Image (cartoon, grey):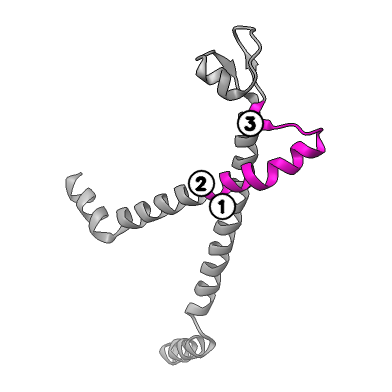
Amino acid sequence: MLADFKKFLIKGNAVDMAVWFIFGAAFATLVKSFIANVIMPPIGLLMGKVDFQNLYISLDWKKYESMEALETAWAPAIKYGIFITDTISFIILGFVIFMMVRYINKLQKKEEQKAVTPAEIKLLEEIRDSLKK
């Protein structure tokens, strides 16, 4: 098992995975910021000036002026506005990753198709035919 792990590290898979993990985390932060600062404000405006970051249900049934006041009081709450924002971020991030993987797979298929050229096929057919004779 240790030899397999060493082989895994030497091949570069671990480094590739680490790079993609860091890239993914940075990309997720970017998408989250885009949703919170670009997408959600117009949606909130269309819904009657709703600020999704301040939508919550206080579990101690007290009324707080803002989310900051709620958090300062350490009051328990269901913060469903943040959940809605995070859900939209997840859907958009998932879609973008899906499109990236789809594009990468398309490029890989093109590379596989380019791997054997018609000239090579013709040469292989000639060799096969001469072996048959």
- The residue tagged 3 is 53
Label 2 or label 3, whichever comes before in sequence order: 2
Q: Would residue 90 appear left or right of 11 to someone viewing this image?
A: right
Residue depicted at x 23% and y 59%? 10
Quarter that holds the C terminus? bottom left
The N terminus lies in quadrant: top left
Residue drawn at (58%, 66%) of the image: 106
The amino acid marked with disc number 3 is Gln
Where residue 99 appears, x then y in whole percent? 61, 57
> Percent from the top left, x then y, of residue 30?
54, 50
- Give the mark, 3 or 1, whose residue is nearer the N terminus: 3
Q: Residue 76: horizontal and vertical position, in percent?
A: 54, 13
Residue at 51% across, 68% down: 108
Q: What whole-number distance in Å separates the C-alpha atoms at marks 3 and 1? A: 25 Å
Q: Is-magenta flag for residue 76? A: no
Crowdedness near tag 3: few (<14), some (14–19) or many (≥20) residues, C-alpha within 10 Å: some
Residue underneath mark 2? 29
What secondary structure predominates along the stretch shown in magenta? helix
Q: Pointer 2: residues within 10 angstroms few (<14), some, or many (20+)?
A: some
Q: Where 73 sits versus 40, above or below?
A: above
Element on which disc 2 rests: helix
Q: Residue 60 carries which label?
A: none
Q: What amino acid type is highlighted by mark number 2?
A: Thr
Does the magenta-highlighted stretch encompass residue 44? yes
- Does the residue at mark 1 contact the one at mark 2 (Cβ under 8 Å)? no
> Closer to the observer: label 3 or label 1?
3
CA–CA distance between discs 1 and 2? 14 Å
Q: Residue 97 carries which label?
A: 1
Q: Give the range drawn in magenta.
A: 29-54
x then y, percent, for residue 87: 62, 35
